[in-house]
Amino acid sequence: GALLVSERIDREELCGALSPCSLSFEIVVENPLELYSGAVEIQDINDNDPVFPSSQARLEISESVAAGARFPLESAQDPDVGINSLQTYQLSTNPHFALDVQTRVDGSKYAELVLEKELDREEQRELHLVLTALDGGSPPRSAHVQIHIDVVDANDNAPVFNQSTYKASVRENTPSGTLVAKISAYDLDDGPNGDIIYSFSSHTPAKVRELFALDSVTGELRVKGQLDYEETKLYEIYLQAKDKGAVPGVAHCKVLVEVVDVNDNAPEVTVTSVYSPVPEDAAPGTVVALLSVTDLDSHDNGLVNCFISPGIPFMLSSSNNAPGIPILNVSATDPDLGRNAYLSYILLQGIPTIGHIFSINRENGTLYLLTSLDHEDQVEFSMMVQVQDGGSPPLATNVSVSVFVTDLNDNAPTVLYPHPNTTGTYTDVVAPGTPAGHVVTKVVAVDADAGYNAWISYTLLQATDSSLFSVGLHNGEIFTARQLREDDAPQHTLVILLKDHGEPVLSTSATVSISVAEMVKEVLTDLTDVAPANDPRKHVTFYLILAVILVSAAFFITMLSVGIFKCYKWRQSKELFNSSRSTLYRTPGPFHHIDAVRGGFMPPNFYHQVYLTTDSRQSDLLCKKPVTSSPLGSRQSTMRNGEPGLYHQIVGTASRLPTPAE
């Protein structure tokens, strides 16, 4: 079962720059036949040297170039990954140049020669330098390139761009060939020394060269490939201008191209949950489904409007906040310089749902809301934001962010009593002559909102007699405003208005029926008179009554049958008892032997043998002398505690038991 290496494994050939690198395999085991899967992770070793594109490089540098000028060098490549990849460059010691190693966004390294001391052609016509590329292995592997620098006579003026940074915006669906920006540089020299050629800088990524094209004569930067806002929102393009002098002068500039989003993504609807089936008596406002809609586009292109088909008994309701708005800005500072001070913000996905609700701008730390919030669903959200710099290795810190959802008045009061959706009539009764201030009933309601938005006030909106009843402003209690008189109407209908204290004010109403009567029977009679003629539930009541009658009749018949059966068994046992008393003592015949002591019927000091035949009337009882004398009454008392069937047989033969003297 040992897994062996059959040939040399080359991680770079198998996976290239992909890390980690793994190989999957399957093993078949026989007896019994089973299949196992496995994977072998190929770990990188430092088995590749860095490699330069060529073994020699030649530079022509004018003696008039001022100190501080920078000259990009060709980068070395190392197919190893991680620490075994290319880590740094070294330059041989010399009095004129220093080496500046830079790090790209993807972590790769490139080197630039920096002129520290001006050249003098009359003193030294050429320089020979050695550039060494080192990886991070132990021991490190290296590669060398010979740099031959020709110091030529001065081309006194180098090209100069009219601005160091250009900015442009282009839509992501812009066709190929569209002009993005035009760079311009000038050179005060005449002739070939003043002619300028524009090109990409040597360390411009290949992806940028695929998407943009630069005219070397006019300096026009045009779209070449297909841009995608969702993939990259900003391109940083480095360009250079070089004259045609014997020692070309070089100038560098940067073009920032912002990709503008277009509405090229359709909204996606996700059904979070569906409550089905829906009861036919569900109250209006009952939630039957939860939906979420997302659009990968940004700004207005990412906002969606939702509609449902008309003519159906459903409506769409959006939650208390608009998606896509900024709600917070997380800000951090870094005292480092350059790339080391470049900060990026990340929303850590500790809770899976947080990523569906919030997002953060990686560059400026602005926290955005992706979907609507509901205070009644969740009041607080807690998340963790990480900010890290662009150094190598990057340094990071975390900050805890809490978002509190404030309440809006989006829920009207809900009446609990009297129930608004029932077809029946709630009638409260008050006796004639009831004094003022007597509480008749109470309207009970709740509001799903919080705080001031949930305060409910009660007002008497309409009444049969407005002078007879009043309602408590804050508690909903309905009480008599004066003493009831004999001439007051027997039936009263009150309409109570319930309002919350939100902005805007939301309200609902409740209808209360009150009857003036001495007894409840009078009220029931009145309710019978006003009951609907065709009550759809009357058939249900009839069948319920019929079922009760049938069950009761079945129970009575069952009990009667059990009683008759018990009487029959009692008479049969009585006849058996009388028959056993007249039976004479018989010689034991075929019998079943029962040990009464071990059977638990007799005490240990009084041993009996009972002989039972298949016919109980021919059974015999054999009594042996007890260990200690005991009255016959006690023996009979002991036998009465045994099995009922055995008890009758013993009583029938007790008169024939021998006395202790016998």
Image (cartoon, helix red, strand yellow):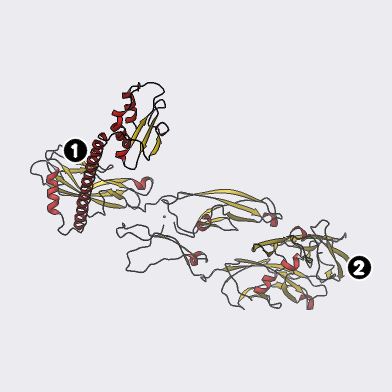
Image quadrant where one finds the N terminus:
bottom right
Q: Place residue 225 in its image quadrant.
A: bottom right
10 Å neighbourhood of mark 1: few (<14), some, or many (≥20)? some
Q: Is residue 574 shown above or below 32?
A: above
Tell me the SS state at disc 2: loop
Q: Is residue 204 in view? A: yes
Query: Residue 512: horizontal and vertical position, in percent?
Result: 21, 48
Q: Which residue is mark 2?
A: 122
Of circles 1 and 2, which is in front? 1
349 sits to left or right of 635: right
Q: Place residue 169 in its image quadrant.
A: bottom right
Q: What's the residue type where badge 1 is placed?
A: His
10 Å neighbourhood of mark 2: few (<14), some, or many (≥20)? few
Q: Is residue 449 shown above or below 318?
A: above
Q: Is residue 461 in view? A: no
Q: Residue furthest left?
A: 487
Viewer-side residue, 357 vs 286: 286
Q: Which residue is mark 1?
A: 438
Query: Residue 352: horizontal and vertical position, in percent?
Result: 53, 55
Residue name at image x 54 percent, y 49 percent: 401
602 sits to left or right of 340: left
